[in-house]
Amino acid sequence: LRRTFKDMITFIPVVIILLIPLSPIGHVLVFGAIQRVFPDFFPSCFTERRQNLLELYESTEYSAVVINETWQEKLVRLLQAIGFFAGQLGNRMYTSLGGVLEKSGDDVDDAGKQ
């Protein structure tokens, strides 16, 4: 009888803690209590900092950047880009063939020693 009474006494707070947040009204009450105890727990769009950022973004004008260059400047830029990519390709080919050339050079040295 004592154990049953003790279980009933502990059952009431457990039901309150577990079932109240599951009901819609309990959900509102729990989140309201959390908001009251910890005001910065949930992010808000209406904080002063966010409002200032919104005003800053709205006041900033974004204009398109137009690059005016002659056809000679475009040709120079194109040739520089081609030279850069050709250099990169040559570097990759040299490094990949470097191991092959070293191995074939070792074979020639071994054949000359015999």
Image (cartoon, helix red, strand yellow):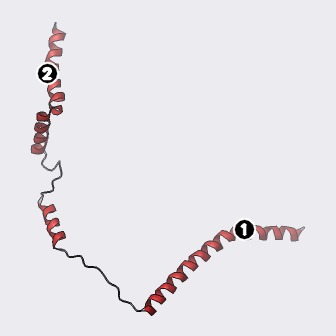
Is 15 rendered above or below residue 49?
Answer: above
Label 2 element class: helix
**Quarter holding residue 68:** bottom left
Which residue ends up furthest to the top in the rendered image?
1
- Image coordinates for residue 22, horizontal then vertical, percent: 18, 32
The N terminus, quarter of image: top left
Label 1 element class: helix
Name the side, left or right, on which 87 lies relative to 51.
right
Disc 2 to disc 1, how far (Cα)?
Answer: 80 Å
- Amino acid type indicated by mark 1: Val
The C terminus, quarter of image: bottom right
Is 52 rendered above or below residue 79?
Answer: above
What residue is pinned by disc 1? 100
Residue at image location 84% in from the left, 67% down from the top: 110
**Quarter holding residue 25:** top left
Residue at image location 17% in from the left, 10% down from the top: 4
What residue is pinned by disc 2? 12
Residue at image location 17% in from the left, 66% down from the top: 53
